[in-house]
Each structure stands twice: as structure tokens, then as C-alpha cells.
Amino acid sequence: MFPISARIHRLLWFVLILLLTACGQQGGSATSAPAAFRVELSPTLEYLSPAISACVMQYPELQLVLEEKPVGDMGKTGADVALIWGDHTVPAKSSVFRLGADRLVYAAHKSNPLQKLTADQVLHLDRGSYSTWADALKNLCPDCAAPESLTSSSVEIWHYTPGSDVYAEISAMPVNVPSVPTGRIWLAPSARTLAEIITNNPAAAGWLPVRWLNENLKEIPLEGIDTASQIIPVIAATPGEPAQAVSGWLHCMQSSYGN
């Protein structure tokens, strides 16, 4: 054995470092960066945000970009998935997946004495036919007892901005008859806003997805209306057949929704 000179020793170390560096670069290139996964969310489905994030954590190859958008803008920006409340505003030529179902209910403050309404009664109430709650209760529930703070209040009936998914589903309800005169009504930009309004104002009422009800709100049961018409699908729409990871994410969302 002959001793290795210092120059050759340095050369060998240099070659070894080059080889290790090259191997490291090859290993790094084999691990691709997470793909951007764009999800458009209707404001009506804002309550799904925690489930969206929890499900995407199961798929590290997806990097979530969550955008809340009006349903009229969905399907126009190349998002991977559009989450929509109801099926009347699904973008054209989309693949549609049902995540679950919600109910469209007529909601009021828990202190409101109304216990039920017929189809005709809810139609007249929802069209702003009564100026005060004293007038409304006289016609809708003459035996109902209510505090003066409510009977002296103006009836505030809230609708939604045209073009929203809730507006589209309300328009499809059998109680929506255009020939009935419309009185004074208010417009809410979203279900969350309306839930907050009724929570803070016992004189307010309007249609809500049942998942937006809270401990201060109640559903007023409706008689003479096909209950099936109140069941609203929650839809995931994709531009085409989803990739494998996206399909897995959709399955997770179906399990999270629970119905």
C-alpha cells in the first residue's frame, strides 16, 4: 500500500461531495410540491369551513386555496371544486356530487309565539302583508299571547339577494306565488347575516337553512306543504372527473356532513 498524497486526498473528498450533492438534488426533485387545490365556497355553506380544512389534511399532496364566492361567479375561474347549497345554481357542464342535505325552514326568534303556519299563512306573512305583529298574530294565531314589545313592533320579513343559492331554492318552493301582493320586505346578503338579524331582533323572520338555527332561533312548522320540497341537497361541482386525491377529499366531506 502506498500513502495517498494530500492533493489526491483532497480530490477524492471533492468528488465525494459532488456525488452526495447530486444525490440530494435528485432526491429533492422526486418529492413534488403540493398541488394547489382551489375550492369555491358559497357563503351559505360557510359552516363547512372546518370540515374542508380537516379533510384536506388527510391529503398532503393537496394545498388548499379556499375562496368564498357568490354562486353566480362559480365555475368561471377554473376552481377544482365548487360547494353550493342546492342544485338550482350549479355551473353548466359540471360533474355533480351530493355531499348531503339540508332543510329550508321558516325561522323566527324563539320568543315569537307562532307555533305553526299553513301554506297560505306563511305566504302572506312572507310577502310582508302585515304591518305590525299585533296585526299578524290577530290573523295567524289569535289565541297566541305575546309581549307588548313584540305586538307593537313592525313585522320585519327578510328575503335574500336575487342570484344567491338560497333565493333560488325559495323561488322553487310551492308557497312562492307571484300573484300575491308584496308589502315591505328587507334583503339579507347571506344566511349567516339573517341568522344574526333574527337572533338580535324578535320582530324579524324569514327562510333559513336549518343548519343556521341557533339556541335563540326556532323553526315554525309548516302545514300543507310537501316536506320533501324543503329538503335541499348540498352539492360539490367539479369541471370534470376529479383526480384521485380530490375524490378522496370529496368522500371525506360526505362523511363529515353526516347525511
Image (cartoon, grey):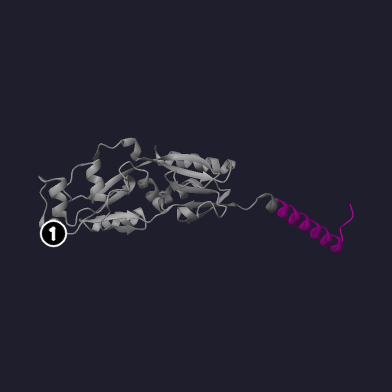
Viewer-closest of 172 and 84: 172
Q: Main secondary structure of the magenta part?
A: helix
Residue at (57, 46) in percent of width and height: 239
Q: Can residue 177 be seen?
A: yes
Image x and y of residue 16, in percent: 78, 56
Viewer-closest of 147 and 152: 152
Residue at (37, 50) in percent of width and height: 167
Q: Is residue 151 shown above or below 246?
A: below
Q: Quadrant of residue 199?
A: bottom left
Q: Amino acid at mark 1?
A: Ser
Q: Quadrant of the C terminus?
A: top left
Image x and y of residue 235, in percent: 46, 43
Q: Which residues are magenta?
A: 1-26
Label 1 packing within 10 angstroms: few (<14), some (14-19), many (20+): some
Q: Quick one: SS at disc 1? A: loop
Residue at (14, 53) in percent of width and height: 135
**Residue holding disc 1:** 152
